[in-house]
Amino acid sequence: MPDAIELHALVHNARESLGVEIKAWLDPTQPDGIAKIVKCAFAMRNYGGGHMLIGLDNLTGQSLSEGCPADVRAVFHTDVIQPLVAKYASKRFEVTVEFVESAGRLHPVIGIPGGTQVPVATRSGLKDASGNWLLRENRVYVRSLDANGSPSSTEALWSDWEQIMNTCFDNREADIGRFVRRHLSGLTAASLRAAASLMESATSEPPASVSVLPSSETIPAAAASKDAGDVQLMIASPNETRVQVIAELDAGRRRFGIVRKERGIELPEHGAWETAAIVRGKLPKMRPTSEFLARFLGRNPGLTGWPIWFDSRNFTEVDYRPYVFDGAWESYVPDFRDSMFPNIDFWRISPPGKFYHYRALVDDIPGEKRPSKPLTELDYTTPMWRTAEAIAVALEYAKALGATSDANALAIGFRWSRLRGRVLSTWASRNYMLSLDRRAHQDEVLSFIHVPIDAPSSRIAEYVREATAPLYEVFEGFEAPLKAIESETSRVLERRW
């Protein structure tokens, strides 16, 4: 997706999350402003990346006039912000600064990349004019949720270090994985088997027998229980799980149709991309309260400008805000009037661990730099982006519900509809070209994956490939290269738009 579109959506639908922090106008030359930028940048870096939006109200997301400098670009130029981060960071990393216009004002968007392999700490302190410490040396900052589910940048507590270290190890694992794939990409299956045979014969003891199933067929064993109150995994066969996911997809689509009819808004003709996720296994009992929703939505990492299962609680349009229906939170946003980032979305989030999202294919909604006719094209990389984001966000939401690696698993289903007659294109994929016009002759595609709760981010590209393979295949047998999937997945997870 083009950078400008994602940044536009990020600012014009600004909502705070673990991956997004919103600040009113500040002065990056003054101690207070410096401290806010440094804390946020370090916390985002240790969390896995994110964005800092300047000059907006953190509750409403609206543009603020008070405190806006006369020359925003000069005050927040990269040459101003980057030295601040470098001065206080224990390990240097680069940030980006982009500018998006809202309400006639430019707003800086400071991008903090993920990928850290060592926690970033402050290497020096900073005091205000009264001698009070704003930053102290040797402090590590993280993104966290308070008791009300509001995200913030705070000093790391003992309870945060597991997440910090997991992030660092995941990034190291991703680097190792890329290294191995790069050096083994030219080897054939026969040569790999020969190498494995040589290594096996060189060992003094025979290796233990390990049986590996494809991820779509893997069903975790039941968790051991110490007493009757322990969480127990509900065992289900792959076919039973698929039936449950399909039922959730169908129920979500029916509910979308009902809400659409009730609201009476005429929608443009479009295809859709649907996601349904089910956390398998028992979870702590919860009710669909406001506190539940705040904590749940606060875990959204904000990987794109218009994230899946977005937070619409403070939308200006009251009808777009979430409401409870039949024990689940729902949100319906048919906002396709925005020429830069039009969208049609509907989602449901249920405390028992079921999430559903309906989104119109962006290829079909009229807007700037879109296909001239709906139902004629499908962008090549957009499914990779959205699938990667759906998997990453669903994992975060499952953890927010109390899911654990030894007691739960995540089943996710994807459905693309109204595909027949479309051509696979690169209208939004600036870095790719397709040599042939590949046309779809099938109207609907379903795919399923099972993802362990503790799956590292380095493995998400594998799940993206598995989930999208059936989609690409209907375009005359097309197979998306793994290199492209890994590249686009990394762009999403590291927020490199």
Image (cartoon, grey):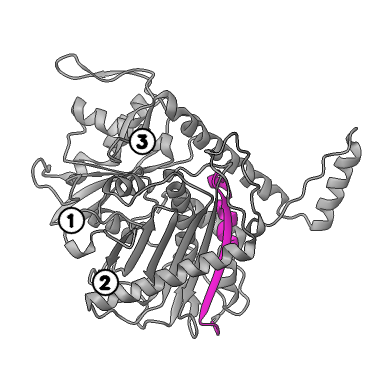
Q: Examine the structure image and report whether residue 462 is included in the region drawn in magenta.
A: yes
Q: Which numbered tag is attached to residue 336?
A: 2
- Circle 1 crowding by C-alpha within 10 Å: few under 14, some 14–19, many from 20: some
Q: Are marks 3 and 1 in contact (CB under 8 Å)?
A: no
Which residue is at 63% across, 41% downward?
Answer: 176
Q: Can you say whether 23 is above or below 309 in the image?
A: above
> What x and y, as percent, mark residue 97?
30, 45
Look at the numbered disc 1 and give the secondary structure of its residue. Answer: strand
Looking at the rendered structure, the kind of residue marked 1 is Ser
Q: Quadrant of residue 215?
A: bottom right
- Circle 3 crowding by C-alpha within 10 Å: few under 14, some 14–19, many from 20: many
Q: Which residues fall within the magenta stretch?
A: 440-466
Q: Is residue 91 visible?
A: no
Which residue position is annotated with label 3?
A: 143
**Residues under labels 3 and 1: Cα distance?**
26 Å
Looking at the rendered structure, the kind of residue marked 2 is Phe
**Residues under labels 1 and 2: Cα distance?**
18 Å
Could you tell whether 263 is left or right of 375 in the image?
Answer: left
Could you tell whether 489 is left or right of 307 in the image?
Answer: right
Work out which quarter of the rendered image holds the N terminus and state it. Answer: bottom left
Which residue position is annotated with label 1?
A: 102
The answer to which of 74 and 201 lies nearer the viewer is: 201
